[in-house]
Image (cartoon, rainbow, N blue to C red):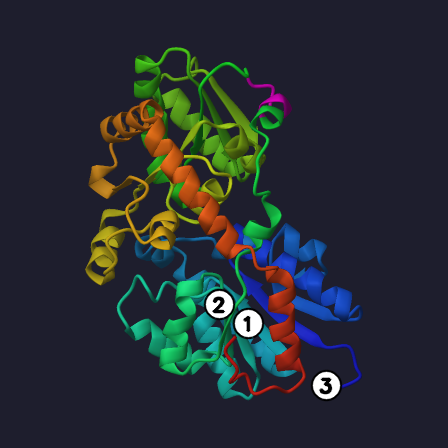
Amino acid sequence: MSSAAPRIAMVAGEASGDLLGGHLLEALRVRMPGMVAEGIGGARMQAAGCESLYPMETLSVRGYVEVLRHYRGIMAIRRRLLERFLERRPQLFIGVDASDFNLELERRLRNAGLPTLHYVSPSVWAWRGWRIRRIARAVSHILVLFPFELPIYRKAGIPATYVGHPLADDIPMQVDKAQAREQLKLDATRTIVALLPGSRNSELRYMADLFVQSAQRLHAHLPDIEFVCPSASRATRDLFEAALLRNGARELPLKLLFGHSHDALAAADVALVASGTATLETALFKTPMVIAYRQAALTWQLMRRMLYLPYIGLPNILAGERLVDEFLQNDATPESLSRALLALLNDHERQRRQIERFREIHATLRQGTAAKAADAVLALLGGADGRRAA
């Protein structure tokens, strides 16, 4: 490696990627204090010293239909980033998740002779095999978060390293529920249900009314229940408050939070969670849950033709079984969700089994992720050819 401070380009497209990127940058900066990083990132990456050239929220779009609405703007950003990185030629490009955006950028940079690292495997285990071929063309090395992903890349001849998940490092194995309730000023004697309808505006547009109506139905069965709903941003909070107003639910016993999702999950007896990284967070907090997801009808029709796993929730995929109830698209109704939550609250043996498996998942994923990821980056910066899989 050159004695000059290394320059790294990095792009994350949403909050979970920003968390991963921030952890990695912090670990790298300990080893390389003069490192320069630029690209796209949120608050965590910026706090770790990454100059964000565009707001991360411009990439935080999920689903085919939703992406089409923003396609021209997103493609313009990718084109300008490509031009900038080819001109400035960083020592390494790191794409943090956001595979629809990053893999094509990585392919073009790699073709131009720049090493590329992709952090977080696209869901090749859930989608048809064409994705693995696309990854092979784009990346010099890939960092995977889950142990079952490593053999997939080894078989395809793609250099890969299993690093675990940083959330498993950050979240304690034993959670203090009483302390979390005190922190949020929640009644220690009441049943608490956490509502996590998603972190993106596009998700709230499909999920907010569903979650509000489900809470209303559950409250009708259990009048002493209390709900807590953390919001990822001011915009998502506004969308959820609008759903409360539309559904005449302003009197629902509900505490709306700005952030504090971890406190909410620690405090809750059970949770209703939109499919995504939040389901993993819920499992790591050992909170029994029900998973739901809705999206644009056309997006769902296209996705279901390509999916081949029998479930989409990360806790179920990691457990290798339908440990947690999932309700998707037309099956996700206020009736079905409230009924499933009520059944889970009344079934203490099922709660115990979920918690037990969540502990096993947590132990498996606790790997010292940031340090392992930093080791892989240093190997690439040091001229390793990336062919090692660990």
Q: Badge 1: how crowded within 10 Å, few (<14), some, or many (20+)?
A: few
Q: Nearer the viewer, residue 388 or 135?
A: 388
Q: Disc 1 designates what residue?
A: 80
Number of callouts: 3
The reply to whether callout 2 and callout 1 are in contact (CB within 8 Å) is yes
Identify the disc placed on residue 1: 3
Relative vertical location of residue 180 with respect to residue 73 in this rendering, above or below? above
Magenta-colored span: 181-186
Which residue is at a point 48% across and 28% down the rendered structure image? 268
First in residue order: circle 3 vs circle 1: 3
Q: Badge 2: how crowded within 10 Å, few (<14), some, or many (20+)?
A: few
SS state under label 2: helix
Mark 3 vs mark 1: give the one in front: 3
SS state under label 3: loop
Q: Disc 2 designates what residue?
A: 76
Give the image quarter of residue 31.
Answer: bottom right
Please give left or right for residue 237 compared with residue 248 in the image: right
Relative vertical location of residue 321 with respect to residue 158 in this rendering, above or below? above
Q: Nearer the viewer, residue 16 or 11?
A: 16
First in residue order: circle 3 vs circle 2: 3
Indicate the position of residue 219 as horizontal and vertical percent values.
Answer: 35, 16
Which residue is at a point 57% across and 33% down the rendered structure image? 263
The reply to whether callout 3 and callout 1 are in contact (CB within 8 Å) is no
Q: Marks 2/1: CA distance?
A: 6 Å
Which amino acid type is shown beneath numbered disc 2? Ala
Which amino acid type is shown beneath numbered disc 3? Met
Which amino acid type is shown beneath numbered disc 1? Arg
Relative vertical location of residue 238 with respect to residue 134 in this rendering, above or below? above
Q: Marks 3/2: CA distance?
A: 33 Å
Indicate the position of residue 209 as horizontal and vertical percent values.
Answer: 34, 30
